[in-house]
């Protein structure tokens, strides 16, 4: 019981204003510096947009104008499938992020106040739907206008419909959050992503996928915008139903994910988004009956991690369908299209298989409990990616073999190449934190630290270089015994590189700079 | 004023469908203090979170000021104050501004004077213009406690308030809580400090996964003394 005299409670706007003004008073940034930063950001955004428009236009010109025969897919059908996947990813991501949340300080110091929560939450509730709308508008605008070359009016209508749909999806996740149904919303988003490649296959099989234009009529855009407005109104009315735990959880994920984005740490980003959906408790612990020693303990642990992450299994299956689809789309079924599809989808699949290694890198204490040196730990952690990528390679290289009229050859080459994927996955998982000490490099998108590229390339470098025989075989559309032999040699080298504990980049090794090896322990 | 501030009948709390302790039954009247004691992980903080409306009980009946706890209601937030082990601060706001935000945000008249008094009382007057990041962990704990007293309340809920406090500040906290009771306020605290229990609490509840027992403060202090160090 307090003897405090009470007057009128301030409004949410006054609370927010007090916090912002008090913080700005010692922010150290004058109006000149703020204007300068804003002008710099705008100019970088404009240059990036111009470069993107140019690249899209060039891509459109370079694509062959081949009509899609029956049983194959048009580029437009692939774009629609990709947009369905993007819609599912938007819903899943929004549900993982909250989407309404408050950072730790706001949650700790604002939420216990007896002020009306609705105006306090209005700004964070609007942020993600607006971002989704802008991204959807621009992305689909580029695809419809730039790649598909649709009629400008129809392309604009499609872009507006996509932007509004993006906002609707995020707002729907917000409504699910207010009803305490974040997990079903997340699962629905993941299911839509998984359904997208199946949709593309269905379009190909049914013959409906040969249409060259998928632009939407204006009325669809109008309906989508009306829906977005209604969803925004509904969410606003339910903001006061959001409790502190869900707001805090959402804010925590957003803060962690934003920190990972700013520091270019894709592993941390993955952890932030994965942990957001992980239940706090399991019904029972795994029996781990296959553990016979330290190596089998690591392999078993990695298998359990993969089995418990349904999203990574979906990612593995979904990425396997991408090269299969690329061989079915006339515009993509050239050497370049298939090669890029195998490379990008393959690397995305490997990242799904190395969750155990990424977790171990973040908290190496558990690895240190085992009587294994760091090199052996990395080699043991390649086993699960190896097994998973073997399963991934079978449908992929059967499809590629059908495309190249050499199924047996490409299947054999794909299986010999599996260790390269595994090595790349583990090398990427154990890459050191980006080096921010180096000089900044000016790029059209703004200044970036020079050491960043060297760190981010760890993993993809092994995949790109270690699969050179495969790339050559794809280019020639044939597999020879020499290629198989060279691929086996490259795989052996890749495993050696992937299990190395050196943290130096390739350039540092060439320059002979002092070693910063992790030592004998992981 | 209700005759019972807090009433718990066979309340079961936990996470992911699994309870963390046995069903708990206890009550707390105005002007009284109840201490929750038990080993680490026994469920004391989880019970506090349920009382603060931050966690839905899995079973039983829980009434705070006559209603099911719902921290989304502004009236609940005015009358129930929770001081948990939160270590989140506005990085650009000073110690004084954090306290002022709390007091003013609750509509306290003369908030500046109230804050000045609390800064002095909790030994933070030298650090009033410092940012929280510059404080020691004990000073940050004192700031959290001061924030709890900078606002109106009928029920004060404290999670291990003795943590990171020196002996003198622990004694001061005990006398502050005794004053709180004398003014008609109710205090619910989870603690591992047997002295604090004996000084402040009128009853204690021993929380474990086997049974939740109501004890005298002396018996609770004896149980704490037997806890593994």
Image (cartoon, rainbow, N blue to C red):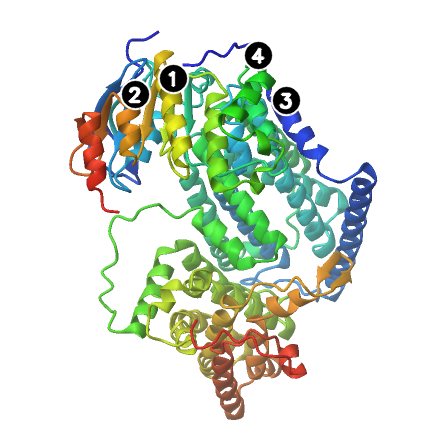
Nearest-to-viewer mark from 3 and 4: 4
Of the image marks 2 and 4, the number of the one nearer the N terminus: 2
Q: Which residue is mark 4?
A: B109
Q: Is residue B125 among the parts visible in the rendering?
A: yes
Please determine whether, in this image, residue A132 is positioned above or below residue A321.
above
Of the image marks 4 and 1, the number of the one nearer the N terminus: 4
Q: Which residue is mark 1?
A: B180
Report the chain holding disc 1.
B
Nearest-to-viewer mark from 2 and 3: 2
Q: Are marks 2 and 4 in contact (CB under 8 Å)?
A: no
Q: Which residue is mark 3?
A: A13
Q: Which mark is residue B33?
A: 2
**Residues tagged by mark 3 and mark 4 found on one chain of the structure:** no
Seen in the image, is A40 located left or right of residue B43? right
Q: Are marks 1 and 3 in contact (CB under 8 Å)?
A: no
Q: Are marks 3 and 4 in contact (CB under 8 Å)?
A: no
């Amino acid at each position: 019981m307090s003897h405090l005299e009470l007057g009128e409670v301030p409004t949410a706007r006054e609370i927010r204003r007090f916090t912002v003004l008090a913080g700005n008073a010692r922010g150290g940034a004058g109006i000149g510096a703020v204007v300068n930063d804003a002008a710099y950001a705008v100019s970088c955004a404009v240059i990036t947009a111009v470069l993107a428009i140019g690249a899209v236009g060039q891509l459109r010109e370079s694509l062959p104008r081949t009509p899609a025969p029956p049983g194959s897919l048009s580029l437009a059908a692939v774009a629609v499938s990709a947009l369905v996947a993007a819609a599912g990813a938007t819903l899943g991501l929004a549900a993982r992020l909250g989407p309404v949340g408050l950072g730790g300080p706001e949650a700790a110091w604002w939420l216990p106040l007896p002020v009306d929560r609705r105006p306090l939450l209005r700004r964070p509730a609007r942020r993600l739907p607006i971002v989704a709308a802008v991204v959807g508008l621009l992305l689909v605008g580029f695809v419809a206008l730039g790649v598909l070359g649709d009629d400008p009016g129809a392309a604009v209508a499609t872009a507006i419909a996509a932007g509004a749909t993006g906002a609707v999806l995020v707002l729907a996740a917000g409504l699910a959050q207010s009803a305490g149904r974040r997990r079903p919303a997340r699962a629905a988003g993941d299911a839509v992503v998984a359904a997208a490649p199946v949709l593309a296959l269905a379009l190909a099989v049914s013959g409906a996928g040969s249409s060259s234009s998928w632009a939407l009529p204006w009325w669809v855009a109008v309906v989508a915008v009306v829906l977005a407005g209604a969803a925004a109104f509904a969410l606003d009315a339910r903001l006061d139903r959001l409790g502190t735990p869900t707001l805090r959880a959402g804010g925590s994920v957003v803060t962690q994910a934003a920190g990972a984005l700013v520091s270019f740490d894709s592993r941390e980003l993955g952890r932030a988004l994965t942990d957001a959906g992980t239940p706090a408790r399991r019904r029972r612990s795994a029996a781990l009956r296959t553990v016979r020693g330290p190596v089998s303990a690591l392999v078993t642990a990695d298998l359990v991690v993969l089995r418990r992450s349904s999203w990574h299994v979906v990612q593995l299956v979904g990425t396997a369908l991408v090269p299969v689809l690329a061989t079915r789309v006339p515009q993509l079924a050239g050497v370049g299209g298939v090669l890029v599809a195998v490379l990008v989808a393959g690397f995305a699949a490997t990242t799904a298989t190395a969750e155990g290694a990424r977790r171990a890198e973040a908290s190496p204490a558990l690895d240190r409990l085992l009587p294994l040196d760091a090199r052996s730990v990395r080699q043991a952690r390649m086993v699960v990616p190896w097994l998973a990528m073997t399963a991934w390679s079978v449908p992929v290289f059967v499809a590629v073999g059908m495309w190249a009229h050499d199924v047996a050859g490409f299947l054999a080459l794909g299986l010999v190449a599996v260790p390269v994927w595994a090595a790349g996955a583990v090398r990427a998982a154990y890459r050191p934190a980006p080096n921010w000490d180096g000089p900044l490099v000016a790029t059209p998108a703004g200044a970036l630290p020079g050491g960043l590229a060297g760190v981010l390339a760890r993993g993809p470098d092994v995949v790109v270089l270690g699969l050179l025989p495969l790339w050559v075989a794809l280019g020639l559309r044939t597999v020879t015994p020499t290629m198989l032999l060279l691929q086996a040699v490259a795989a052996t080298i890749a495993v050696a590189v992937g299990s190395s504990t050196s943290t130096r980049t390739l350039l540092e090794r060439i320059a002979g700079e002092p070693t910063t090896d992790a030592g004998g322990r992981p | 004023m209700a005759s019972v501030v807090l009433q718990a009948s066979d309340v079961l709390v936990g996470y992911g469908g699994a309870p963390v302790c046995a069903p708990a039954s206890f009550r707390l009247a105005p002007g009284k203090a109840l201490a929750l004691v038990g080993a680490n992980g026994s469920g004391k903080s989880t019970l506090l979170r349920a009382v603060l409306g931050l966690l839905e009980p899995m079973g039983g009946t829980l009434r705070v000021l006559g209603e099911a706890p719902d921290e989304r209601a502004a009236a609940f937030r005015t009358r129930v104050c929770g001081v948990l082990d939160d270590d989140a601060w506005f990085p650009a706001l000073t110690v004084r501004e954090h306290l002022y935000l709390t007091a003013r945000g609750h509509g306290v008249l003369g908030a500046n004077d109230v804050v000045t008094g609390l800064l002095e009382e909790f030994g933070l007057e030298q650090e009033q213009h410092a940012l929280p990041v510059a404080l020691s962990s004990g000073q940050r704990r004192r700031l959290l406690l001061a924030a709890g007293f900078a606002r109106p309340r009928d029920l004060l809920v404290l999670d291990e308030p003795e943590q990171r406090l020196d002996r003198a500040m622990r004694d001061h906290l005990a006398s502050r809580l005794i004053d709180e009771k004398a003014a008609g306020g109710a205090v619910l605290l989870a603690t591992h400090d047997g002295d604090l229990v004996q000084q402040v609490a009128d009853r204690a509840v021993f929380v474990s996964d086997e049974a939740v027992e109501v004890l005298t403060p002396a018996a609770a202090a004896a149980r704490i003394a037997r806890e593994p160090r």
